[in-house]
Image (tube, rainbow, N blue to C red):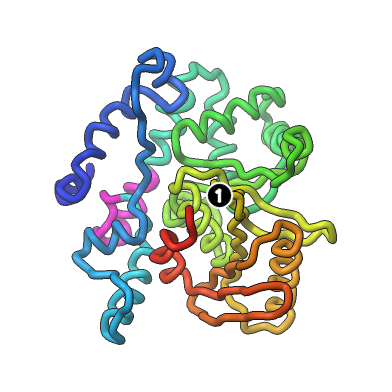
Amino acid sequence: MVHDAYYSLYPWKKGAERVHARLLSREIATQIRGRALSWEVFPFSFREYLDFRGISAEFPMSTKGKMEVRNAFDGFWETGGFPEVVGVEPSLRIKIHQESFKAMLMRDVVDRWDFSHPRAVEDLGHWAADNAATFYTVNSLTGLLKSLGHKVPKSSVSEILEWFEDAYFFYTVRLYDPSFSRSNANPKKIYSVDHALLKSVSFGILGNGGHLLENLVFTALRRTGETPFYYRTRNNREVDFILPGKGGTPLLVQVCESMTSAVTRGRELTALTEAMKETGAGTGIVVTRDEEAEIEDEKGRVRVLPAWRFLLEMDQYGI
């Protein structure tokens, strides 16, 4: 159930959700034969969450306003963006997440595609929830399912991952490379549509706050309509996200829960500045949980931003 107040803020989304309830993304163009406009509907962004809560988020902010926004971000971090869980008590929020997850696996994947291995879909879905922001290959996932007793071929594993994406629950991020074959052959990363959903459906205790933060940043980038990739420098250092950019200037985003450790700071900045030099990006961004700084040297400018500010300032990055 979605709050009525959500639709009072964004009435156009109600019709879009009704269409999506009947047709998944790849089916719309086929069924309507191209005579349609479609919009992707995501859970609340942080700005939409603030609108829903009646909290102003315009810059420049007063000290009081900044404190209110930061406190609201703590709430967003706990509840995520699904409108139906905002404002409900934690045990009910977890139950709603779990039921939505179960419905996606059974209704939007197993039933819709008449797949004969429902337990394999369920196990792969829970693996994805437990391993958000980590690398995978289709071979490794096929081996995982085989070790769990599922006789599912590689081709079916690839199809399940595509079905997850069609259902708007899990997404694959590929290596940024001019060669599609090289990009596709390299390990990929898995992310969820909502970071708080992961905490509710994970079998284990998802204790890696850095992975949750990375998932939060992925969702924000994905809802722009651009396709995020990850980047690997010539020295084999990784940057979490690159958006190629419509204007030819890429956006490089590194995610690090905390930069207080000198070792961590050096590792993240070295990878980012190498990538900036190789791609021609004049500015790089490091998203943290609650740290802020600006670093300038001959390699370019790096902005270290707390997550709440990055989410609110995204319209300034040209994406």
The amino acid pointed to by label 1 is Gly
**Residue interval drawn in magenta:** 83-98
Q: Is residue 116 left or right of residue 43?
A: right
Say if 293 sits above or below 107 in the image: below
Say if 312 sits above or below 163 in the image: below
**Residue 312 coordinates in the image, percent (x, y):** 39, 65
Q: Evaluate whether residue 241 shows in this view.
A: yes
Provide the secondary structure element on which disc 1 rests.
loop
Quarter holding the N terminus is top left
Magenta region's main secondary structure? Answer: helix
Q: In this view, does 195 lie to the left or right of 296?
A: left
**Residue 151 coordinates in the image, percent (x, y):** 69, 24
Q: Residue at x 22, y 64 (%)?
A: 53
Q: Mark 1 points at which residue?
A: 247
Q: Which residue is drawn at 48% across and 31% down?
A: 166
Badge 1 local density, few (<14 within 10 Å), some, or many (20+)?
few
Q: Residue furthest front?
A: 247
Indicate yes or no whether the magenta region holds residue 109.
Answer: no
- Near-viewer residue (147 or 87): 87
Indicate yes or no whether the magenta region holds residue 91.
Answer: yes
Q: Evaluate whether residue 131 shows in this view.
A: no
Q: Residue at x 58, y 77 (%)?
A: 258
- Near-viewer residue (46 or 252): 252
**Residue 211 coordinates in the image, percent (x, y):** 58, 61
**Residue 28 coordinates in the image, percent (x, y):** 39, 21
Q: Residue 41 sits in which quadrant?
A: top left
Say if 102 sits above or below 58 in the image: above
Say if 286 sits above or below 314 in the image: below
Q: Which residue lies furthest to the right in this view?
A: 235
